[in-house]
Amino acid sequence: MTRVLVVEDDDDLRAAVGTDLCENGFTVDEAPDVAAAAAALGERAYACVVFDRMLPDGDSIGFVRQRREAGWTVPVLFLTGRADVADRVAGFEHGADDYLGKPFSVAELCARVAVLCRRPAPRPPVLRVGDLTLDTVRHEASRGGAPLALGAREFSVLEFLMARAGTAVSRTDLIEHCWDVSTDPMSNVVDVVVRRIRRKLGPPELVHAVRGRGYRVGLPG
């Protein structure tokens, strides 16, 4: 399932873009402004986000820039009427992966989104959430400077969650990426491993259960 978030304040255009993407095989969520986009990004993982720039609560370029500075790697396409050279350059300088001006071709939009969704997300060699550090090259973990003794499965699950920090990750996604294909998706293996991780991390809790969705790594509150 390739899930795309479309952020556009024009209701008709947002619905039309969502419909076009759905007809081309994408699963689409919609948001009318930056605040709704931030909420959606906190709840789900997306393969790509399509942003209009001028939204009711501000220019989305600032939101994308802040997320990039915090390590966010989800591909972003700006779909906007602000499409002169200076605007496009600003978009790329502040976190855009692609930039498409309005009016636009539906076929071109879908093709560009498809390319971004196929792009492997870069993952930094060292992941950090609060005082928790995971070195994916050396396969070492620490919290508050103290080393953590994590098993291979625990490390894999924690790495997957930390790479998506702030986003709820389903048990199904964890099983697909951290276990082999023979694992029963209805089993409780994820919950067992997460309990071990939580115990080893200690307080304050960084791995949170998200009702009906799975687990999310993030600071309390």
Image: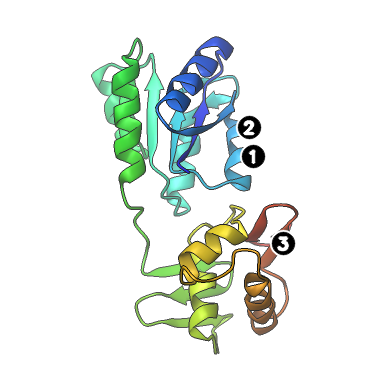
Image quadrant assignment for residue 9: top right
Identify the image quadrant of the C terminus: bottom right
Which sits earlier in the primary sequence, circle 1 or circle 3? 1
| Residue occupying the point 33% across, 35% down | 114
Amino acid type, mark 3: Ala
In the rendered structure, find residue 39 and report the number of the disc placed on it. Answer: 1
Question: Badge 3 is on which residue?
Answer: 209
Helix, strand or loop at disc 2? helix
Amino acid type, mark 2: Ala
| Residue occupying the point 32% across, 45% down | 118
Question: Badge 2 is on which residue?
Answer: 36
Residue 1 in the image: state x and y as whole percent.
48, 44
The image's colouring method is rainbow
Q: Residues within 10 Å of mark 1 (few under 14, many from 20)?
A: few
Q: Which residue of the protein is positioned furthest toward the left in this rendering?
A: 85
In the rendered structure, find residue 63 and report the number of the disc placed on it. Answer: none
Helix, strand or loop at disc 1? helix
Which sits earlier in the primary sequence, circle 3 or circle 2? 2
